[in-house]
Amino acid sequence: MSEDAFLATYDPSAYGRLALTVDVVLLGLRDGRPAALLLKRDEPPQAGLWALPGGFVGVAETLEAAADRVLREKAGLSGLHLEQLYTFGAIDRDPRMRIVSVAYLALLPETAFAAAARNGAGLRPAVIEVPWAGEAGGPVAVRAPEDGQERGPLPLAFDHADILALAILRLRGKLDYSSVGFALLPDRFTLRQLQDVHEAILGTALNKPAFRRRMLDRGWLEPTGARAAGTSFRPPELYRFRQPR
Amino acid sequence: MSEDAFLATYDPSAYGRLALTVDVVLLGLRDGRPAALLLKRDEPPQAGLWALPGGFVGVAETLEAAADRVLREKAGLSGLHLEQLYTFGAIDRDPRMRIVSVAYLALLPETAFAAAARNGAGLRPAVIEVPWAGEAGGPVAVRAPEDGQERGPLPLAFDHADILALAILRLRGKLDYSSVGFALLPDRFTLRQLQDVHEAILGTALNKPAFRRRMLDRGWLEPTGARAAGTSFRPPELYRFRQPR
DNA sequence: TGAATAGTGTCTCTAAGACATTATTAT
DNA sequence: ATAATAATGTCTTAGAGACACTATTCA
């Protein structure tokens, strides 16, 4: 059924007045670039376009519970830390009916991100191409990773380009003064990996000594004593994130 | 009708599944302290408690339009700058039925705040007592201004103490790097007034020379050439806020 | 030893805090 | 002149950026 034919036969009033959904940005890093897990829609509306995993909020379900359920149903993940991003309420953001959506952000370390992309039913990673390096905003484009079949930017459904953009902006804003960055790393990591994460999200290079000083002075890093193996050079120290009490 | 009697006769299923509202924090300063405009509920549920102005979101109304309408209907104000704060979705935040609410923040300069308190149907200013001086959060207490009849803290309806707390936190976070602070001032103001606003919101004293340097270096302040009158000492220069292009 | 990255020492620069001093008005 | 606050000069200090240098591992 074509998009137009679908809309012609769709009866919005059959669905009541106003619906509430959650959409979850499952953000991780792929080859050192920010990426999100997206789902290809195979039903109208907007069949063939790529969308964030989402779902309706139940009457006896909190917003966080709905987001967690979506995560479980669509990515096989549960219990991730969720942060509310923003609530999108434009009248025509969904062509079926009036749907207001609360957007959430969840962060995955690189291995969990790759695993979810393999196990999640139809979830595929898409590298986010952020056209703004500074603090300005605007929608973003996404692209299938190099190893995929698709070429060119992937078409995004609804207002999901705006939601993705907001996720990046929010992350950038909190990165330096909060501990969100660690959610994108495995349990044990090197200072270089931590800096790579920050640079990937911020989209700019950072000064190494200053970065190390700042991070170590925060008191969030606990040296494990172990060092990373498998390098052909001086092995870096492994750290663990430790919540400042 | 008592609160219990009301709840006993109330049929939640008659209202459908899930409703969406907006609640607006109308924030201003009163005697140099942050204050919000509140409404005394005279119907159950929670009759007698103090609540933020709010209302249901129409099917063909954006969230911002709903917030603007609430502002117009309850405070006689329109076209104010609105900032979305957060969406509150706890199951039992309203005893009648499942109501999810999108909270908005609007800022008023001191004179407009006082005028809205006079003209708004039942809107009364309440000084916000923030128990945390740093960055920590938690609900806040409100109190009628000294000149009023009431004594002691005013009881707040629903989760509105949390909403008010979030408004303060958000404002504090944006105060130093954005131009929100100017929305709490009249068109022309002195640097001391600007500093007073910042100190009232932050809850801490600021260093005068450093504050002046920072503000002037921002390029947002345009000297008017005029000076404030009516002082018995050196009259301060009046500035105007000018959006940095 | 050479290559490669880890990790650090140090200088400079910027901006904030502290504190004192000068400026300007009304009484 | 005095009182009161505006407005600024300057010293100190904290932290970031720049850049070079040392450290450590494998091949």
Image: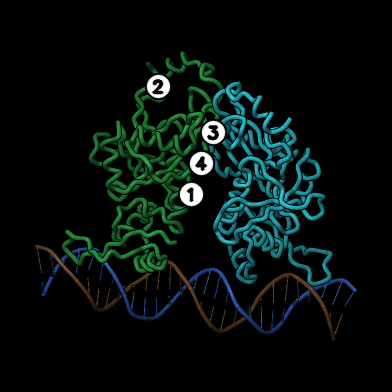
Chain colours: A green, B cyan, C blue, D brown
Question: Along the line of sight, which residue is nearer the eye, A68 or B109?
Answer: A68
Q: Nearer the viewer, mark 4 or mark 2?
A: 4
Q: Position of residue A144 (x, y in %)?
A: 30, 38
In the picture of the structure, the residue carrying the numbered disc 2 is A44
- Name the secondary structure under disc 4: strand
Q: Which of marks 1 and 3 is in front?
A: 3
In the picture of the structure, the residue carrying the numbered disc 1 is A136
Under mark 3, the amino acid is Gly
Question: Along the line of sight, which residue is nearer the eye, A121 or B154?
Answer: B154
Chain containing the residue with disc 3:
A
Q: Position of residue B63 (x, y in %)?
A: 59, 35
* Labels 4, 3: one chain: yes
Chain containing the residue with disc 4:
A
- Name the secondary structure under disc 2: loop
Under mark 2, the amino acid is Pro
- Please tell me which residue is depicted at 59% across the width and 65% down the height of the picture: B214
Q: Where is residue A229 in the image (x, y as percent from the top left)?
A: 19, 60
- Asked if labels 3 and 2 touch by Cβ distance under 8 angstroms, the answer is no
Under mark 1, the amino acid is Ala
Q: Quadrant of the N terminus of chain B?
A: top right
* Labels 2, 3: one chain: yes
Q: Which of marks 4 and 1 is in front?
A: 4
Please tell me in which quadrant of the rendered image residue A143 appears.
top left
Q: How far apart are marks 4 and 1 (CA)?
A: 17 Å
Which label was assigned to residue A86?
Answer: 4
Is residue A245 positioned above or below A142 on the image? below
In the picture of the structure, the residue carrying the numbered disc 3 is A89
